Image (tube, rainbow, N blue to C red):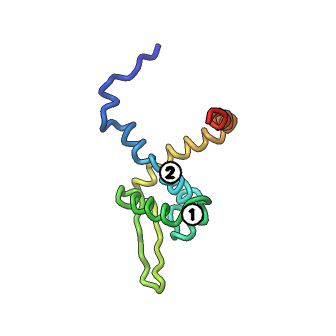
Amino acid sequence: MRIGSPDHEWREDCAPRRVLEIFSSKWTSMILHVLDTRHKGCARTGVLQRSLPGISKKMLTQTLRDMEADGLVTRRVYGTVPPAVDYTLTLLGKRFVEPIELLYGWGRANADALDDLAARRTKDA
């Protein structure tokens, strides 16, 4: 029989809350996923934007800045005109790809449940 986790495991600075904080923006996990699976860990800004339908340039830029500040990606600026910029997964960023892939795999395997959830939300709205 499984007993609930102790209260101290859910304090404000606990690991699960910190993980959720990193992924509070849907774009963070999607950028990590796309960088890893489609671009071998490194891509220019425009390539990333084309790889993520629905993301605005402003949201992409802000999310990449946040990810850089968190140490998930590094930013490299080339001295060309106009300047070219690319983003590369750091070792820390690569560590976050594995749980994202597990979650995305679960989503693909359970698309019917996600469809049911979306239908319920639409019905109740």
In front: 66, or 74? 66
Label 1 crowd bin: few (<14), some (14–19), many (20+), radius 10 Å: some
Instruction: Point out the frontmost of discs 2 and 1.
Output: 2
The single residue placed furthest to the front in the displayed view is 125
The residue lying at 61 percent from left, 66 percent from top is 50
Name the amino acid, label 1: His
* Residue drawn at x 54%, y 53% as measured from the top left: 30
What label does residue 29 carry, if any? 2
Camera-nearest residue between 55 and 81: 55
Helix, strand or loop at mark 2:
helix
Residue sitting at 39 percent across and 37 percent down?
A: 16
- For disc 1, the marked residue is 39
Q: Which sits in the foreground, 105 or 112? A: 112
Give residue 80's position: percent from left, percent from top. 46, 85
Q: CA distance from mark 2 to mark 1?
A: 15 Å
Residue at 34% in and 22% down: 6
Which of marks 1 and 2 precedes in the sequence? 2
Where 16 sits versus 48, above or below? above
